[in-house]
Amino acid sequence: MDKKIVFSGVQPSGELTIGNYIGAIKNFAELQDEFNCYYCIVDLHAITVPQVPKDLRKRSLDVLSLYMACGIDPEKSTLFIQSHVPAHTELTWVLNTITYMGQLNRMTQFKEKSRKSDENLNAGLYTYPVLMASDILLYQADFVPVGEDQKQHLELARDLAERFNYRYSDTFTVPEPLIREFGARIMSLQDPESKMSKSDEDANAFILILDDKDTIRRKIKRAVTDSLGIMAYNDEQPGLKNLINIYSVFSNDDVETILKRYDGLGYGKFKEDLAEVVVEGISPIQDKYKDLINNKDYLEKVYKEGAERAEYAAMKTLRKVYKKVGFIPR
Ligand code: AMP
Ligand code: TRP
């Protein structure tokens, strides 16, 4: 029986945080035995905000190395760079023509980004979710593992698949989001009401996968909690709740166990241990990353082979789409 298909992507637009790791990449590795997985480095998406070209190149290889350092095996999964497969932009054009502007106007990520960057309100930022839908639909993905913030974009992808299928006959698989209940939204360490984001101005708000040990310890020590001083897991203590979530993911202990262990010990001791749990969990990833990033020949081999495999699958879908909309084959 053919394996079901999984697709996901990460933008090479900054250094990755433990939010990216917990919400997305950690799950990618766990899916690769059961599914036929495509994991993409979405550089076309990244340029919707200004990038320094040299940094973009470096970060694309960083994400590739981190994918593998987090356990994704290029023999099992297809790892590739979005701009290497032109079908992504080609399908985007077709899907643009069946996307309503009203739908794009409702995208919260676009609304947020446009509020922040009124100087660079470019059309790419607006059609970003259509490119994302193309990524997914080209591979006939059944499942898309993402963090909570991508849910709305996924609904658009489903909607476009259904609309195209209805208008032109069955063509696309309608994808389902895979959003883990736990860890799908890791919050800022400085403001537990907002998402941990690599673009936060305050570097204390996030922990990078590549932060050194002392930086991790310092950031956790400074993390905002509350003045109640009671070890508990609830929405009135969102800072603490977030830290418990992080502890749980890295230690594999459940919330009950953690609460019992630190009952009456105070936040100080809990934070101290949390820092060690995170450092211990992340060190092996950092070590693997350091090996990989210096092995440029190997990285090149991985992304070239990945692009070939990805292109083969993508072109199959694109040819069907072009035929159905009435383009004459070359
Ligand atoms: P991005 O960095 O925006 O390309 O996001 C890559 C993946 O990480 C997406 O699946 C996001 O949903 C996920 N992600 C980003 N930030 C967080 C966070 N704070 N908590 C959980 N998942 C996240
Ligand atoms: N928009 C996603 C993010 O910022 C990245 C992304 C691009 C993606 N294309 C995708 C995620 C396709 C899943 C599937 O996190």
Image: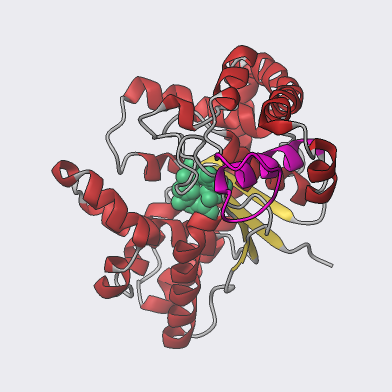
- The residue drawn where x is 71% and y is 36% is 74
* Residue 10 appears in the rendering: no
- Up the image or down, 222 lies above or below 187; here it is above
Q: How is the image coloured?
A: secondary structure
Is residue 234 toward the left or the right of residue 134 in the image?
right
- Up the image or down, 298 lies above or below 125; here it is above
Q: Position of residue 130 (x, y in %)?
A: 38, 62
- Up the image or down, 269 lies above or below 39; here it is above
* Residue 117 appears in the rendering: yes
- Up the image or down, 102 lies above or below 92; here it is below
Residue 33 located within the stretch drawn in magenta: no
Q: Position of residue 238 (x, y in %)?
A: 56, 48
Is residue 239 toward the left or the right of residue 5 in the image?
left
Q: Position of residue 310 (x, y in %)?
A: 58, 48
Q: Quadrant of the C terminus?
A: bottom left
Q: Quadrant of the N terminus?
A: bottom right
Quarter where residue 47 is shown: top left
Extent of the magenta region: 227-251
Quarter where residue 259 is shown: top right
- The residue drawn where x is 44% and y is 30% is 14
Is residue 202 toward the left or the right of residue 146 in the image?
left
Which residue is more in the foreground, 36 or 49? Answer: 49
- The residue drawn where x is 31% and y is 68% is 106
Is residue 8 toward the left or the right of residue 279 in the image?
left
